[in-house]
């Protein structure tokens, strides 16, 4: 009888402890679920918006690009190199035509090189080595009334004939 009584007390304490633990666990889960829901609703009002630079942008005037130079001024924000040859100017999209990595310009060699799989492009954008199947894209250019050159990334050309004609080259 005494043993049963002591066992009863121990069992009661154990049950009490378990009930209390489960109660706290339940409350914790409920609080976590509630907090998650509130956070998700809060985030709904602040969507993650990716900043995309405009497809058309001004790059200055012809005299900003001396003959025989490649400008990387727009390379970071717009992924565009501006190439000025003696009597033409064109804008090359630096996105590699293999799998889309960004090429870099190496002035000592006068070449564009892709860091991903080793494609190499000439100053005109032609593929010279590596897996890239076609030339870098040239982008359409126009000149505004104030002499500002405008690049249009929505219009691009990489075929050997058309890319050497207006609007993909600017005769200067
Ligand atoms: S992405 Fe440029 S070589 Fe593969």
Image (cartoon, rainbow, N blue to C red):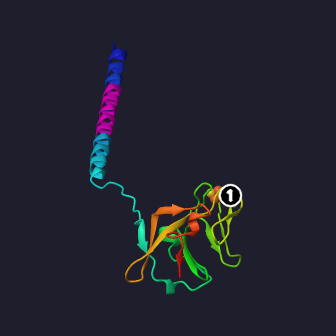
| Residue 56 position by quadrant | bottom left
Label 1 sits on residue: 117
62 lies above or below 55? below
33 lies above or below 154? above
Determine the quadrant in which ligand 1 lies: bottom right
| Residue 46 position by quadrant | bottom left
Where does residue 87 sit, x and y in percent of width and height? 58, 82
Q: Nearer the viewer, residue 33 or 120?
A: 120
Q: Residue at x 35, y 15 (%)?
A: 4
Q: Is residue 14 visible?
A: yes
Q: Nearer the viewer, residue 22 or 111?
A: 111
Where does residue 14 sit, x and y in percent of width and height? 35, 27
- Badge 1 marks a residue whose secondary structure is loop
**Please, what is the dominant secondary structure of the magenta stretch?**
helix
In reply to whether residue 18 is colored magenta, the answer given is yes
Q: Tell me if 126 is positioned left or right of 95 in this view.
A: right
Q: Tell me if 9 is positioned left or right of 169 in this view.
A: left
Specify the segment rendered in magenta.
13-30
In reply to whether residue 159 is colored magenta, the answer given is no
Q: Is residue 94 visible?
A: no
Where does residue 168 sit, x and y in percent of width and height? 52, 69
Number of numbered discs on residues: 1
Q: Residue at x 35, y 24 (%)?
A: 10
The crowd level at tag 1 (other Cα within 10 Å; few <14, some 14-19, many 20+) is some
Quadrant where the N terminus sits is top left
36 lies above or below 142? above
Q: Tell me if 170 is positioned left or right of 3 in this view.
A: right
Q: Residue at x 63, y 67 (%)?
A: 125
Mark 1 sits near ligand 1, with its Cβ under 8 Å away = yes
| Residue 154 position by quadrant | bottom left
């Amino acid at each position: 009888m005494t043993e049963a009584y002591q066992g009863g007390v121990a069992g009661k304490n154990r049950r009490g402890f378990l009930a209390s633990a489960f109660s706290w666990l339940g409350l914790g889960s409920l609080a976590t679920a509630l907090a998650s829901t509130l956070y998700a609703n809060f985030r709904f009002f602040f969507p993650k918006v990716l900043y995309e630079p405009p497809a058309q942008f001004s790059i200055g005037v012809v005299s900003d690009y001396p003959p025989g130079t490649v400008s990387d001024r727009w390379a970071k924000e717009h992924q565009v190199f501006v190439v000025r040859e003696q009597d033409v100017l064109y804008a090359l999209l630096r996105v590699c035509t293999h799998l889309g990595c960004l090429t870099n310009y190496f002035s000592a060699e006068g070449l564009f090189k892709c860091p991903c799989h080793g494609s190499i492009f000439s100053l005109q954008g032609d593929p010279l080595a590596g897996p890239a199947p076609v030339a870098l894209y040239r982008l359409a250019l126009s000149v505004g009334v104030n002499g500002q050159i405008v690049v249009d990334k929505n219009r691009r050309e990489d075929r050997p004939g058309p890319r050497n004609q207006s609007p993909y080259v600017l005769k200067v």
